[in-house]
Image: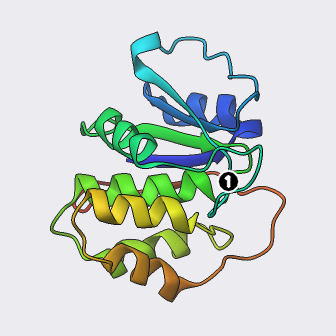
């Protein structure tokens, strides 16, 4: 189970899901959330901005960020992935994690599940491209995300879950 939420709903999402692993995707300088009951080894914070091309004063998502996130989330245990709004960085990384955890599952099927779970999800294209390369998906992840298109406009997303095939 991969749960996505905005920062503003992290505490309630953790309480509701009882997940014990958290991936925080935050901009440089943003305060890291305090996570009561989560062991430090079970919380990874990666810092980069929600951009898709270089921009002065901003840190773009990079190959190292994606690889570190995928390694951290490689186990089967439930994980909560959040960014500030729960719309772009976190939805992209959740999709990447789902593809990594289920290497035989069709990318289009996972992208369609992402769209059904979150009408406002607009996965960061650069994260998707980097994950596509890291996972050897040969452009299929990027094509699947392009096919679902931009999500509905929203200030922030609502929490949602991506279930692994065969999981409840």
Residue 62 horizontal side relative to residue 118, left or right: left
Residue 167 location, x and y as percent?
27, 54
Q: Residue at x 48, y 77 (%)?
A: 145
Q: Nearer the viewer, residue 143 or 54?
A: 54
Residue 141: quadrant of the picture? bottom left
Question: In the displayed structure, does residue 39 sit left or right of residue 85?
Answer: left
Q: Can residue 163 be seen here? A: no
Residue at 22% x, 59% y: name it: 102
Q: Residue furthest right?
A: 155
Q: Position of residue 74 (x, y in %)?
A: 26, 40
Residue that protrudes farthest toward the front in the picture:
56
The picture quadrant where one finds residue 26 is: top right
Extreme residue in the bottom direction: 147
Residue 61 or residue 95, whichever sits in front:
61
Write the residue at 24% across / 70% down. Answer: 137
**In the shown orientation, is residue 27 left or right of residue 63?**
right
- Mark 1 sits on what residue? 50
Residue at 62% x, 67% y: name it: 121
Asked if 25 appears above or below 153 in the picture, the reply is above
Residue 19 vs 60, above or below: the answer is above
Query: In this rendering, would 117 be left or right of 129?
Result: right
Residue 80: tell me if it is visible: yes
């Amino acid at each position: 189970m991969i749960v996505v939420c905005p920062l503003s709903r992290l505490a309630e999402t953790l309480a509701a899901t009882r997940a014990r692993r958290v991936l925080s995707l935050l901009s440089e300088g943003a305060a890291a959330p305090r996570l009561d009951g989560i062991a430090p080894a079970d919380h990874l914070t990666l810092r980069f901005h929600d951009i898709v091309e270089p921009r002065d004063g901003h840190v773009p998502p990079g190959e190292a960020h994606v690889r570190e996130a995928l390694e951290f989330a490689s186990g089967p245990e439930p994980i909560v992935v959040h960014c500030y709004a729960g719309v772009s960085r976190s939805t992209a990384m959740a999709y990447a994690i789902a593809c990594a955890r289920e290497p035989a599952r069709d990318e289009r099927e996972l992208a369609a599940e992402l769209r059904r779970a979150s009408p406002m999800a607009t996965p960061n294209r650069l994260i998707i491209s980097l994950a596509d390369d890291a996972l050897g998906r040969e452009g299929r992840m990027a094509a699947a995300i392009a096919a679902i298109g931009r999500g509905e406009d929203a200030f922030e997303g609502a929490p949602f879950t991506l279930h692994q095939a065969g999981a409840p």
